[in-house]
Amino acid sequence: MSSTSKSDNQLETVVSKFYKPTAGAWSESILHLRKTYKEHKAKPIPPTFEFRLDGPSVSWKVFRHLNEAMSYAKYRTKDCMHMWLNHKSRPVDERCTYEVIQENFPCKLYFDLEFNKILNPNKDGIKMTEIFIKCIIASMVEDFNIEFSASDVLWLDASTEKNIAVI
């Protein structure tokens, strides 16, 4: 065997090892694909909508904000119809949506009140919310001369066995 064919064989072996995936690499790829498939099946992509010049935008904008718990929360902007369809398509335990309110635009006064029932066993969340609303009403009259009553307040209760959550 000549030295040229010997070096060609070595080169071919090196090239073959480089480009030929190992059994371990195949296993990792298959595991990654299975994991990705399960994630996408558990959290389906929202249905697509036909784009129309006179209709709502079909693009999604995702913004990340570092919250107090040092984990990421996603914020999406969308029109009402698409937001509702996206909301319905998500698993029930992931249907938490917040409104981003633009600065210097009219809006309603909004509070998101939450506390852990287990850490506060002797506290009445509903009664505390009623007291809070009375304080807000008194403050609005005193500070801004705006009068309204508790019947003008919309309560959205998202409480669970572990948490009180009133919006």
Image (cartoon, helix red, strand yellow):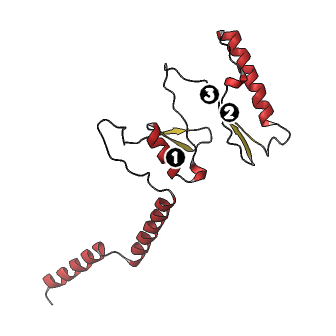
For this orientation, the residue located farthest to the bottom is 1
Question: Seen in the image, is 108 located left or right of residue 75?
Answer: right
Q: Position of residue 79 (x, y in %)?
A: 44, 37
Mark 1 Cα-neighbour bin, 10 Å: few <14, some 14–19, many ≥20: some
Q: Check disc 1 and give the amino acid type.
A: His
**What amino acid type should be assigned to the residue bearing mark 3?**
Tyr
Distance in Å between CA atoms under marks 3 and 2: 10 Å
Q: In which quarter of the image is residue 59?
A: top left
Res. 154 image quadrant: top right
Q: Residue furthest right?
A: 122
> On the image, numbered disc 2 is attached to which residue?
155
Under circle 2, the secondary element is loop
Label 1 and label 2: CA atoms lie apart by: 20 Å
Helix, strand or loop status at disc 3: loop
Indicate left or right for 66 with 10 as reference. Answer: right
> Looking at this view, is 5 or 135 the one in front?
135
- Closer to the eye: label 3 or 1: 1
Sequence-wise first label, 1 or 2: 1
Please tell me the numbered disc located at residue 87: 1
Q: Count every numbered label the image shows and give the total.
A: 3
Dot 3 or dot 1, earlier in sequence? 1
Q: Residue at x 36, y 39 (%)?
A: 57
Residue shown at 79%/43% (left/top)?
Answer: 119
* Image: 4 above or below 53: below
Residue at mark 3: 110
Q: Is residue 43 left or right of residue 47?
A: right
Mark 3 and 2 residues: CB-CB less than 8 Å, in contact?
no
